[in-house]
Amino acid sequence: MNTFKKGKIGEESAEKYLIERGYTLVARNFKAHPGEIDLVMTSGCDLVFVEVKAWKNLPFADLEKSIDARKQHRIKAVSQVFMLQNPALSRSKTIRYDVLFVDGEGKITHIKDAFGDY
């Protein structure tokens, strides 16, 4: 299975997981300079920008390192564009950044507020 297809399956699994827990989908694969946000969701009073990482054999510790400060900065920059384009939604919500890791068997590890304070 190629990387793109594995990523899409991981994103679909993550979306289903979040919806089952009461989240509402706002956008998928939101693109803006300098990158993309996999999922934009709401959960109660939170607007949640979600990064999904799907992997098969990579050790979890290495996977966590893939969301380094540079990647976090890009995701936050793209989220700023989203909020500028959706001011009513972003004004009414608290902003949060979550990461979901999806392994080869479909097990999901959800890290809420993975990037700390907005």
Image (tube, grey):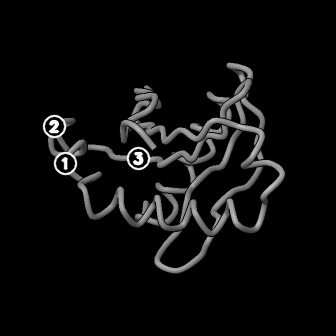
Residue 16 in the image: x percent, y percent? 68, 33
Separation of residues labelled 1 and 2 (CA atoms): 7 Å
In the image, 22: left or right of 88?
left
- Disc number for residue 54: 3
Helix, strand or loop at label 2? It is helix
Query: Would residue 33 appear left or right of 88 to someone viewing this image?
Result: left
Residue 17 position by quadrant: top right
Residue beneath disc 1: 65
Give the structural element (helix, strand or loop) at label 3. Answer: strand
Above or below, comparing residue 73 to residue 111 in the picture: below
Q: Nearer the viewer, residue 102 or 95?
A: 95
What is the tally of numbered marks visible in this picture? 3
Q: Which residue is drawn at 69% across and 57% down?
A: 28
**Mark 1 vs 2: CB contact within 8 A:** yes
* 90 left or right of 109 in image: right
- Few, some or many residues within 10 Å of mark 1 (<14, 14–19, 20+): few
Q: Where in the figure is residue 97, as x and y percent of width and height?
A: 49, 42
